[in-house]
Image (spheres, grey):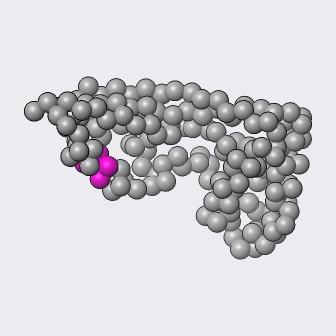
Amino acid sequence: MEETVLNNYAEATRVLQPGGTLAFTVWHKDNLGWVPDMASCFEALPFEAPMPNPMPMAPNGKTEFIDPDLIPEQLRRYGFEEVEVRTAEHVVHMEGAEDYLRNFAMMKDWMMRAYWTEESKEKANGMLDDHIVRHLREKHNGQGWDLPWTFVLATCRKPNN
């Protein structure tokens, strides 16, 4: 991932005209989103169902690409100027437990593939989705709830020379 990010910066430098602007967003290193509810569901299972804590928001584990305090240095390293980085909040409303499961089934599957033993996967077979729905209905009193998301917005300019 680090190489990909660095290659993307190098490619942006290559294709941008002098004075051109690069803008992008990434998840903040401390983003929560779907994580607390999934962790709660997994913790309530009667078998081992691990999830990393904290959840790595950078797949490569390199926070310099998701930390708003470290991104400017990365951009300046590639010669960008007028670097501006800020964070923003976004709230996604879940209508209920089924809505959550529909939206984050991919994350559930990722956690199972990446962190669970074969034994845990076997124990979850055929029961995990029902467990998640029951658990979240109870946790949120059968109501919808909001998921807070934090992301980083960055802009910079390629020098005119």
Q: Is residue 137 left or right of residue 35?
A: right
Q: Is residue 133 left or right of residue 92?
A: right
Which of the image's four quarters has the C terminus? Answer: top left
Q: Is residue 108 above or below residue 24?
A: below
Q: Which quarter of the figure has residue 156?
A: top left
For image coordinates 46% across by 52% down, the residue present is 61
Left or right of 100? Residue 11 is left
> Is residue 155 in the magenta section?
no
Could you tell me which residue is drawn at 65 percent across and 54 percent down? 107
- In this rendered view, identify the residue nearer to me: 63 or 108: 108
Majority secondary structure of magenta residues: helix
Name the residue at the left extreme: 161
Name the residue rendered at 79%, 36% in the picture: 95
| Quarter assignment of residue 70 | top left
Q: Quadrant of residue 122?
A: bottom right
User: Is residue 9 inside the magenta stretch?
Assistant: yes
In this view of the protein, can residue 70 be seen by the observer?
no
What segment is highlighted magenta in the picture? 6-10
Residue name at image x 76 percent, y 54 percent: 42
Residue 160 higher or lower than 125, as above or below: above
Q: Position of residue 81 (x, y in %)?
A: 23, 29
Question: Which of the two residues, 21 or 27, is positioned nearer the viewer here?
Answer: 21
Where does the N terminus fall, quadrant-wise? bottom left
Q: Where is residue 11 shown, x and y percent of the image?
A: 26, 49
